Amino acid sequence: AISIFWFRRDLRLTDNAGFYHALKSGHPVLSLFIFDKNILDKLPEDDARVTFNYQTIEDLKKDLQAHGSDLLVKYGKPEKIWSEILGDYEVAAVYTNHDYEPYARERDDNMAEFLTSEKIAFKTYKDQVIFEKNEILKADQTPYTVFTPFYKQWHAKLNSFYTKAYPTQKYYKNLLPAKNLPLPSLKEMGFEKSKLNFPKLSYKSKLDSYAKERDFPALDSTTHIGLHLRFGTLSIRKAVRDAIEAKSNIWLSELAWREFYMSILWHFPYSAADSFKKQYDKIKWRNNEDEFKAWCEGNTGYPIVDAGMRQLNQTGWMHNRVRMVVASFLTKHLLIDWRWGETYFAEKLLDYEMASNVGGWQWAAGSGNDAAPYFRVFNPELQTKKFDPKLEYIKKWVPEFGTKKYAQPIVEHTFARERVLKVFKAALANS
Ligand code: FAD
């Protein structure tokens, strides 16, 4: 009999919790990846994340081949694929890592039931985060809903036990000898290769200046590791160890923001679709489609907003400060439902992460996990003065800025501010 390690969003051999436990299971280990039709069917054929995922799988396959084994790559719906696999192999146990999104939880619950009925053990491990589920709770055992106290406990609990690497390399001899296992092509799965460039995994040089420079979008001073954390080509334990070594506390706290939002999504899965503060679903959004289109395309006449949207459209990434500005602009200046913006980001961002994206959008709309009151409305002009004082970022992404060709402002700032305050006040009056 064999053990199977099912790779999902942990696409690396080193420092991988579930893979480590599989290698120590006492059975030879077959590695598996499934291109999940349930997920892929919803994506456009040139989706860049699929290309990145695919290239990563090719690399992983080569790595396993270098150790005399191979990666079995399947394409289809997991439940069907697993029935096929159990027909082909005698399986003693299936190992994998925890996954916290609503779809993944349902999939894994079904898997657990199915495998148990086949008398096969299903073992899953924490790998994607330092702390999960109920590890960080308030004294009364309920989850934190505000970041600062969450982070205080997260940081206090952090020690080398939680950040040490799983030494998988010691056990590669336990991989199942294999060769010529299949790999469906991108084309067979209905996708084409994206032309976008993917960020390289080299971030250490950014950590020293991060605290000072991270808020200025013209300086390319953040690490671009989001995509790598999303697919697990970087271990979160390694990132945290590097943050500690570089004494980059602000960057460490950003990694904790990621876990905070994952914790929110885990404890409050409804917040993926509904406002975290439910009374915010009473807001009467204007949802004007032409204005939404102008926002998407970067033609609002607000240069910092347009620069951000064009950076997103052209590269699949947008600077964090600008993400906050464009999200505030859509929800507050244009009174468009945060879910519209969230969906657009989810299509475009290479580093799309459901928990962080929903969290970031709800934070901007005021409906989420924020201690500040809803009447904070970002002023795009002031944000520009503070964070792009020389207009370098704006000029890079909006070359026609300052010419007659540039769009007129889609709405006047003071008018928009008063309008949103009125609409929000009406919706939230009784809360
Ligand atoms: P760095 O600044 O170098 O930070 C390192 C890592 O820390 C990031 O890669 C990310 O994993 C984590 N991180 C940093 N800031 C945050 C934050 N505020 N919340 C959660 N995690 C954080 N981040 C995503 O990873 N995926 C998303 O889909 C996403 N959507 C967002 C939507 C909105 C409206 C807003 C305001 C923020 C969103 N963020 C999202 C958070 C943040 O903007 C990005 O993580 C960051 O800009 C990614 O760039 P970087 O990798 O260079 O980050």
Image: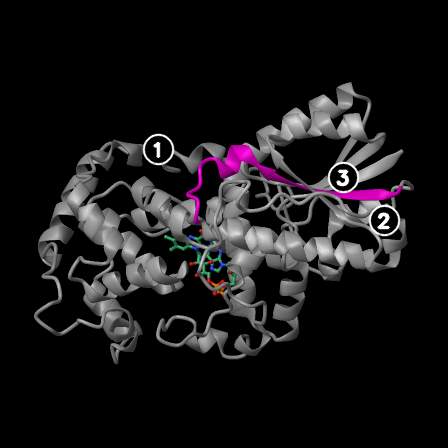
Mark linked to residue 95: 3
Amino acid found under the numbered disc labelled 3: Tyr
Asked whether, in this view, residue 101 is left or right of residue 406, the answer is right
Q: Earlier in the sequence, mark 3 or mark 1?
A: 3
Q: Which stretch is magenta?
A: 28-46
Camera sees residue 29: yes
Image quadrant occupied by the C terminus: top left
Q: Position of residue 15 (x, y in %)?
A: 74, 57
Mark found first going from the N terminus, 2 or 3: 3
Position of residue 171 relative to residue 133, above or below, is below
Mark 2 / mark 1, whichever is N-terminal = 2
Q: Which mark is residue 278?
A: 1
Q: Residue at x 62, y 43 (%)?
A: 184
- Residue 145 percent location from the top left of the image: 47, 44
Q: Is residue 150 visible?
A: no
Name the front one of labels 2 and 3.
Answer: 2
Classify 10 Å Cα crowding around label 1: few (below 14), some (14-19), many (20 and above): few
Question: Callout 3: 10 Å neighbours few (<14), some, many (20+)?
Answer: many
